[in-house]
Amino acid sequence: MREASSRVLLESLWQAGATVQAFDPEAMEEAERLYGDRPNLRLMGTKEAALKGADALVIVTEWKNFRVPDFTLLKKHLHDLVIFDGRNLYDPERCEENGLAYYGIGRGRSIRS
């Protein structure tokens, strides 16, 4: 996480007043070490727990367990049906078919449902 883009994103979201619920299967201990106990950061035990009550899904890691979206779960838990995909893991058309707005960062194409 020393030079991870997720750190820049976290700090920008906090400056905008956001609270972040985060999960990364490999970086949880390091995130806790770097940021400690903050009211605007909730480190969650699973990717599913991180979705509960979230406004949007932001993907900034490409671990294998994030590559296949569970659209039913996403639609159940996200307040705003939107995905910001910083790793371009998801197919924009599949997201649209499932009623989700999709923003593939750097992809040059976004789909808004």
Image: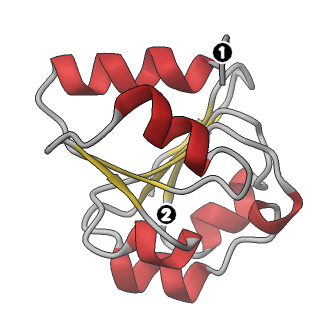
Q: Secondary structure at mark 1?
A: loop
Rendering quarter of residue 47: bottom right
Quarter assignment of residue 37: top left
Split into 4 quadrants, where in the image is the C terminus? bottom left
Q: Position of residue 40 (x, y in %)?
A: 19, 41
Give the quadrant of the N terminus: top right
> Badge 2 is on which residue?
100
Q: Is residue 35 left or right of residue 67?
A: left
Left or right of 32? Residue 86 is right
Q: Secondary structure at mark 2?
A: loop
Q: Is residue 103 visible?
A: no
Instruction: Report x, y in % for residue 102.
Output: 55, 48
Q: Is residue 51 above or below residue 86?
A: below
Of the residues tagged 2 and 1, which is closer to the observer? 1
**Residue at the outermost right position:** 64
Q: Residue 31 appears at what percent x and percent y?
A: 51, 37
Q: How many C-alpha atoms fall within 10 Å of the one at disc 2: few (<14), some, or many (≥20)? A: many
Which residue is depicted at the point 64% across and 26% down?
105
Residue beneath the point at 27% across and 57% down: 55
Check disc 1 and give the amino acid type: Arg
